[in-house]
């Protein structure tokens, strides 16, 4: 029944002598919601950057849906079905909220350059479809009321939501969320987690979630990978992770148990 | 299909403007001096709007736009004077070769992140100028004699086509991709935009219309010389785009009209012209650092009901 969507083998990257990530093995089955946790600087974002083509790994393999994607250009990875959000929000600030989502929807549209320049019927059809789809993503995140607002003018929590809406508009099968709740208050965070659970079902997504808040990850993820100093130190169900001495040690000083 | 109606509305408006001015020219109300000024305005609008696509929309800093204009001017002149082509064909020849040159300069320099394009275009424009300076076939430093063939009609339809193509491009998923690159290249890439492709496309379209402008320019006078297309010319075009507001097409158009009129009236006083140019720039930078219109379009001003400023 379970089908592997992403397989990461012995993944590693070195920055001028510094081994930021090494020997990471992961596998994600279709439909799973998996957590990736670890202290600051553990290499979580760097792992995302390798999965999405921003960095080319210095060792190891990444196989997505049966094909190797390590070192592919980011846009090709995205077209292939992996999209992401950024820990430090990277919206298109001077574009409207709707246009932010439309940009991500670009890869799913078909009307070509000439049809747009000569305003052929395919252009109008294609743009209308983009508008419809983008609006529907905004609705899911309660952002449709802001559609004409510039992205930079959105309240912080809404910017985080827009990041996810935008990633979703690229039509991914695997969604990578890098600390999507960072800086949100508890209520906003709870709402967001419900939304994540909802889009996962609605769009038949597989999700890999980086989150700093352990409670939160434990609450919604089926399995969790723990990174520390660039290496995987544990993986397992939330209960296993909660009782793992290595994890407790890595998070020394932070409360691990409820 | 409301949006296609807007499109045809603009076409009709353009035809009316053309006809009215042509009537005024025919009746002698607009004399040769003013017709010439109108043609120069059209040329400068084409230069400004084509560079606006590269800098204002795609965020790629090009400072050698006069190089592509030179190619359009010289190649079209070779077409009409040496190969006895019809003017229209010669314009196309100049534009296509300018676009190919854009492709040649753009592909290597736009693949890299960072401001390699600025250096590449600066060097390219100088090389082009020196090449024409040293080719006897096109008259070298003395220049190339040309039969005047540009007219209000040619200039106006060239500018209308330039604006239509670039506006249509901008208001589509393709232009949105370019703006995304301007806003955040890494995020654009991560959202599935082939950034190199769109940077090159914008640059090639920009080069094409700089070539058209060059062709109309070349045939509006009796001679073209390499010195016309030096760095100062590139700089003049850059000023139009910055003054109009980076990212605003109508801003570029307004700036081109405004500065052409100023320049025409100050033709006899080149020093005064430079002083006024500098003053205008300083004042704009002090009071409106984002240019006359910022990233807004003149049409936004009339959309009171709508919130925000989607300039797509
Ligand atoms: N481009 C880079 N050059 C050098 N070092 C980097 C680069 N990217 C990440 N690192 C280093 O990799 C380590 C892991 O960082 P990161 O993946 O951002 O951690 P986190 O788990 O908090 O997301 C850090 O020590 C960081 O300094
Ligand atoms: Mg991080």
Image (spheres, coloured by chain):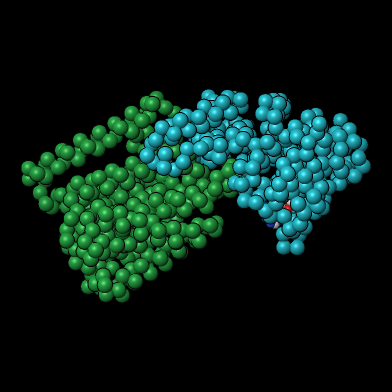
Chain colours: A cyan, B green
**Is B154 drawn above or below residue A158 in the view shown?**
below
Residue B236 is situated, as x and y percent measured from the top left of the image, at: 32, 57
Q: Using the rendered image of the protein, determine whether residue A224 is visible from the camera's viewpoint.
A: yes
Camera-side residue of A170 and A209? A170
Direction from residue A15 to residue A23 in the image, left or right? right
Q: Nearer the viewer, residue B243 or A231?
A: A231
Residue B10 location in percent, x, y? 29, 34
Q: Position of residue B176 (x, y in %)?
A: 48, 41
Residue at left offset 34%, top offset 64%:
B231
Residue at 78% in and 39% down: A4
The residue lying toward the viewer, choosing from B236 and A222, is A222
Q: How many marks?
A: 0
On screen, B82 above or below A63?
A: below
Quadrant location of the C terminus of chain B in the rendered image: top left
* Snapshot quadrant of residue B2: top left
Name the residue rendered at 44%, 58% in the picture.
Answer: B103
Residue drawn 65% across the image and 36% down it: A172
Please identify the quadrant where the N terminus of chain B is shown.
top left
Left or right: where B3 falls relative to B190 = left
* Direction from residue B26 to residue A229 in the image, left or right: right
Residue A163 visible in the current orientation: no
């Amino acid at each position: 029944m379970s089908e592997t969507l992403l397989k990461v083998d012995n993944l590693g990257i070195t920055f001028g002598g510094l081994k930021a990530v090494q020997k990471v093995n992961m596998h994600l089955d279709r439909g799973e919601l998996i957590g990736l946790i670890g202290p600051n600087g553990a290499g979580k974002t760097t792992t995302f950057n390798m999965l999405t083509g921003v960095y080319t790994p210095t060792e190891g393999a990444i196989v997505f849906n049966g094909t190797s994607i390590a070192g592919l250009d980011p846009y090709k990875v995205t077209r292939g079905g992996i999209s992401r959000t950024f820990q430090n929000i990277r919206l298109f600030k001077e574009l409207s909220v709707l246009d932010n989502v439309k940009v991500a929807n670009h890869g799913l549209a078909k009307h070509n350059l000439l049809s747009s320049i000569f305003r052929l019927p395919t252009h109008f059809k294609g743009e209308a479809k983009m508008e419809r789809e983008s609006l529907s993503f905004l609705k899911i995140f309660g952002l449709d009321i802001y559609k004409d607002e510039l992205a930079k003018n959105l309240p912080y929590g809404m910017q985080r939501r827009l990041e996810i809406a935008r990633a979703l508009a690229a039509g991914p099968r695997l969604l990578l969320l890098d600390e999507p709740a960072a800086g949100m208050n508890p209520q906003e965070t709870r709402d967001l987690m419900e939304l994540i659970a909802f889009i996962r079902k609605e769009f038949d997504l597989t999700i890999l979630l980086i989150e700093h808040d352990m409670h939160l990850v434990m609450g919604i993820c089926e399995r969790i990978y723990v990174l520390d100093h660039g290496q995987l130190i544990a993986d397992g169900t939330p209960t296993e992770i909660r009782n793992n001495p290595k994890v407790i040690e890595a998070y020394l000083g932070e409360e691990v148990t409820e | 299909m409301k949006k296609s109606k807007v499109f045809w509305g603009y076409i009709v408006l353009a035809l009316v403007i053309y006809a009215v001015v042509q009537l005024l020219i025919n009746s002698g109300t607009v004399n040769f001096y003013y017709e010439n000024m109108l043609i120069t305005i059209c040329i400068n609008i084409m230069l400004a709007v084509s560079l606006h696509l590269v800098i204002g929309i795609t965020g790629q800093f090009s400072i050698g736009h006069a190089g592509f204009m030179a190619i359009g001017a010289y190649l079209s002149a070779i077409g009409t004077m040496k190969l006895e082509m019809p003017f229209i064909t010669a314009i196309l020849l100049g534009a296509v070769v300018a676009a190919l040159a854009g492709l040649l300069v753009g592909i290597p320099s736009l693949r890299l992140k960072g401001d390699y394009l600025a250096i590449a275009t600066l060097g390219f424009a100088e090389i082009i100028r020196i090449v024409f300076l040293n080719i006897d076939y096109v008259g070298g430093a003395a220049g190339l004699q040309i039969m005047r063939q540009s007219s209000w009609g040619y200039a106006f339809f060239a500018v209308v086509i330039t604006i239509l193509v670039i506006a249509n491009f901008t208001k589509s998923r393709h232009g949105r991709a370019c703006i995304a690159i301007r806003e955040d290249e890494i995020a654009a890439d991560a959202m599935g935009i082939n950034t190199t492709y769109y940077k090159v496309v914008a640059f090639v379209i920009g080069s094409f219309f700089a070539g058209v402008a060059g062709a109309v320019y070349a045939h509006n006078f009796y001679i073209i010389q390499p010195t016309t297309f030096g760095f100062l010319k590139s700089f003049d075009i850059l000023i139009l785009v910055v003054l109009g507001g980076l990212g605003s097409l109508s801003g570029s158009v307004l700036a081109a009209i405004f500065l052409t009129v100023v320049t025409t009236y100050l033709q006899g006083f080149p020093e005064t012209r430079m002083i006024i140019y500098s003053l205008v720039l300083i004042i704009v930078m002090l009071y409106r650092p984002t240019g006359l219109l910022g990233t807004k379009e003149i049409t936004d001003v009339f959309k009171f009901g709508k919130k925000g400023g989607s300039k797509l």
